[in-house]
Amino acid sequence: MYAPLDLQTPLVAQWIGILLAVAGLAVVAHGLWRRKRYRAHLDDEDARYAGPDRLRDAVRETVAGAGVLVIGVAAIVYSVFGNQAWQDAVQDNVAAKYGVESVQGKEWRGNALNADVTMPDGTVHRDVLITFEDSGEPQITRDLTQPPEQPEQ
């Protein structure tokens, strides 16, 4: 009935992707620097790795770093689509149960979302606390059929 919400996977994928992308970028930069140095023969006599395959080794390092960079970017892209998927699931679940027009999330606290909820007639309920069960079913304790509370002036 309700779409389950996966709030953790996109966030974990985002941070792993950022770490892998930064590490891959650093390895690529180091590999390119080594390749440039080896091609210029700047350290022929005192190189730490003076073997005949040192240029090929630098290229391997660059390719490995590029692979890690690609995996990191893929994880970031996955997190963007995963984030959009759970935002759509939140919107669909709340609309299915309460018939709301839109849900504008402000902040998450565990499985609870503080949001502004817009009803089909245009009424906006501010700072509504929506909690979600494991099944994805939303729970709102505020009565959305009453007009929203007006702040005192």
Image: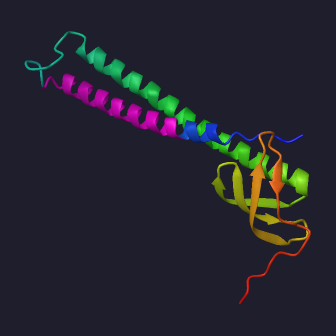
**The residue stretch that appears in magenta:** 15-42
Q: Main secondary structure of the magenta part?
A: helix
Here the colouring is rainbow
Q: Position of residue 118 (x, y in %)?
A: 82, 66
At 85% across and 61% down in the image, what residue appears?
101
> In the image, 97: left or right of 43?
right
Work out which residue is located at the far bottom of the displayed protein and give it.
153
Q: Is residue 23 above or below residue 53?
A: below
Q: Position of residue 51 (x, y in %)?
A: 19, 10
Residue at 83% across, 65% down:
142
Q: Position of residue 42 (x, y in %)?
A: 13, 26
Location of the N terminus (image quadrant): top right
Residue 58, image quadrant? top left
Query: In which image quadrant can residue 77 be found?
Result: top right
Q: Which sits in the foreground, 21 or 111?
A: 111
Quadrant in the picture for the C terminus: bottom right
Question: Residue at the left extreme?
Answer: 45
**Rendering coords of residue 86 (x, y %):** 72, 44
In-front residue for pair 93/27: 93
* Magenta residue check for 105: no
Q: Is residue 21 magenta?
A: yes
Name the residue: 83% across, 75% down: 148
107 is higher (above) or lower (below) than 11: below
Q: Is residue 83 above or below residue 71?
A: below
- Using residue 127 as the reference point, say whether residue 68 is left or right of it: left
Left or right of 25 on screen, residue 46: left
Residue 59 quadrant: top left
Query: Residue most toward the front?
Result: 141
Which of 142/93 is in front? 142
- 39 or 74, nearer to the observer: 74
